[in-house]
Image (cartoon, rainbow, N blue to C red):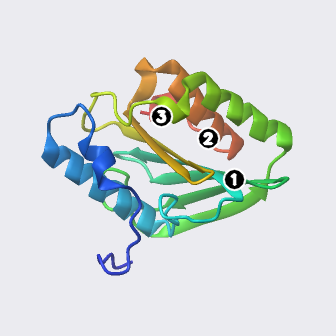
Amino acid sequence: MENSQEDQPIYFPQELFLRTNIKDEEYLCIGYSWYSKQLYAMREPSLYQETGNDIETYRFTWLRTFHNPIVIRISRQRDTFSIILKLCDGLGGYEPGNLVVNLTRTISHQEWEKFQSHLSTIDFWSMETSDDVIGFDGADWVLEGKNDGLYRLVTRWKPNHNISYYQCCDYLIQLAGLVIPDNEKY
């Protein structure tokens, strides 16, 4: 899929990347472009630009350097709860490739509430965008949320040092039906 600036949505407010404590501005610009490129390849909407207030949505973007890029999006619209799993055939640290999996299914209210409990545990809406941990040949765990017109982005590299954040995102991996060995999660 050709990725041009004209037809690509704005996925994130760029200032979120520039307000982190990370001093490497070049890395931040690469991260902003890299995440956007992966989401565009997966034909994902921009949560940041969504205007509907009747939908609460969270998206986990999982970019492991040497594994397929994955997006898991969980949403609530009134009393309907759903999860979407997307996967490209490229590599998360390189080119995303083509969209090869695009599955949607309904989830239960209890599954939604369990995810909400994870969000509460990590205090998602107050977390710093980044935690100063960056690296290469690992995995970026990017969690976004949009609710009542508010947008939030949190990104962690290899979040094994932040167990609650890991458990929140890992719950989505499990809920999506993915079975990934622990040694392939980072």
Residue depicted at x 19% and y 45%: 27
- Residue position marked by numbered label 2 in the rendering: 173
Foreground: disc 2 or disc 1: 1
101 vs 57, nearest the viewer: 57
Q: Nearer the viewer, mark 3 or mark 2?
A: 2
- Taking the image as shown, residue 124 lies to the left or right of residue 153, namely right
| Local SS, label 3 | loop
Cα separation, mark 2 vs mark 1, equals 15 Å
Q: Is residue 40 above or below residue 183?
A: below
Residue type at numbered disc 2: Ile
- Left or right of 113: which side holds 22? left
Residue shown at the point (68%, 47%) measured from the top left: 176
**To which quarter of the image does residue 162 belong?**
top left
Residue highlighted by disc 3? 185
Q: Are marks 3 and 2 in contact (CB under 8 Å)?
A: yes
Q: Residue at x 58, y 26 (%)?
A: 167
Front one among 68 and 108: 108
Image spot of residue 23 (x, y percent): 15, 35
Instruction: Rate crowding at label 2 as few (under 14), some (14 to 19) or many (20 or more) other CA atoms within 10 Å.
Output: some
Label 1 element class: strand
Give the mark nearer the N terminus: 3 vs 1.
1
| Residue at the image position 54 percent from the left and 67 percent from the top | 100
Q: Quadrant of the C terminus?
A: top left
Q: Where is residue 172 shown, x and y percent of the image?
A: 63, 40
Tell me: 122 left or right of 40. Answer: right
Disc 1 marks which residue?
75
